[in-house]
Image (cartoon, grey):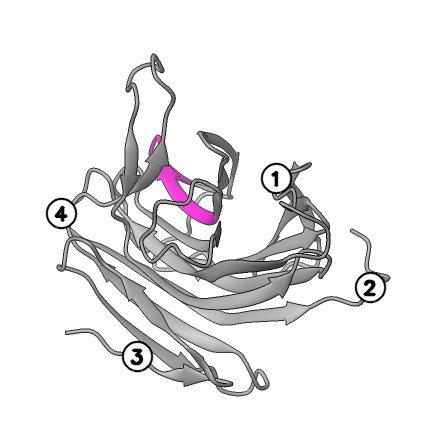
């Protein structure tokens, strides 16, 4: 079963090509209008990842099976905006991840074929957790930064912020309980407009997947999308 809700007249949608994933979306309490809590339970061996012909160890991969809860927004290419949330990943298996997700697509594209997307969140690798970003245009690159080792019975939560300023995207992270906002990725020219002041179509949401796992849970809290002032700089 899946569930859906409406937010400020924008419908939540669910991409689940395996038909074995579920989700819930609820308004967050005490964090103001437009903030949401998203739970996703992924089915087996899901992922978002694209490689070039000849890439090693995997050539010409094109996976878009990770369950994605999202809104579609129509936004001017000149508009600056931010997507933010607290993300956590309770799993222990390699590559299990909880992420924020953005994807630019054409108005006609009803599937997930558009190869301009970015995911940013918490992922397991080498027996520990990292914050990481995968940016795809048209092929995926990946960068990570290690998180402090988990304390027993304490779930690590990280504030992830994705900011689009003109054609550029910046990703920041802040550890829960910390005030230091750290730059994780600066991607110049990631979303060059097709033409000036064009209305763009963006899928904005949350995605949980586990490429090697039979099932993966993920929690996204205080999910929020907002337009930034014209004078905003990173």
Q: Where residue 148 sits in the image (x, y, percent)?
A: 51, 44
Q: Are marks 3 and 1 in contact (CB under 8 Å)?
A: no
Label 3 vs label 4: CA separation? 24 Å
In the rendered structure, the answer to whether residue 32 lies left or right of residue 213 reads right
| Residue that mark 3 sits on | 4
Label 4 vs label 1: CA separation? 33 Å
| Residue that mark 1 sits on | 190
Front: mark 4 or 2: 2
Label 4 vs label 2: CA separation? 45 Å
Residue that appears at 47% across and 53% down: 106
The disc placed on residue 214 is 4
Neighbours of disc 3 within 10 Å: few (<14), some (14-19), many (20+): some
| Residue that mark 2 sits on | 230
- Dot 3 lies on which element? loop
Residue that appears at 65% across and 58% down: 178
Of residue 199 and residue 127, the one placed in the foreground of this image is 199
Q: Quadrant of residue 68?
A: bottom left
Q: Where residue 21 sits in the image (x, y, percent)?
A: 19, 61
Of residue 74 and residue 101, the one placed in the foreground of this image is 74
Label the magenta part by its dominant secondary structure.
strand
């Amino acid at each position: 079963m899946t569930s859906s809700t409406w937010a400020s007249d924008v419908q939540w949608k669910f991409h689940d090509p395996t038909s074995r994933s579920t989700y819930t979306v609820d308004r967050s309490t005490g964090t103001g209008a437009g903030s949401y809590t998203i739970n996703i339970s992924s089915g087996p061996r899901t992922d978002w990842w694209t490689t070039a012909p000849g890439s090693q160890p995997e050539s010409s991969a094109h996976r878009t099976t990770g369950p994605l809860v999202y809104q579609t927004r129509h936004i001017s290419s000149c508009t600056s905006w931010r997507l933010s949330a607290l993300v956590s990943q309770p799993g222990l298996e390699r590559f299990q991840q909880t992420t924020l997700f953005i994807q630019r697509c054409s108005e006609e594209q009803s599937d997930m074929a558009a190869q301009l997307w970015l995911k940013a969140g918490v992922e397991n690798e080498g027996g520990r957790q990292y914050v990481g970003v995968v940016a795809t245009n048209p092929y995926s690159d990946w960068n990570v930064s290690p998180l402090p080792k988990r304390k027993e019975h304490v779930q690590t939560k990280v504030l992830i912020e994705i900011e689009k300023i003109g054609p550029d995207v910046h990703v920041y992270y802040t550890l829960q309980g910390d005030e230091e906002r750290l730059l994780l990725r600066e991607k110049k020219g990631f979303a060059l407009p097709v033409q000036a002041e064009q209305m763009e179509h963006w899928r904005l949401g949350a995605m949980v997947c586990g490429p090697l796992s039979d099932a993966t849970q993920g929690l996204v809290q205080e999910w929020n999308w907002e337009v930034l002032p014209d004078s905003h700089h990173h």
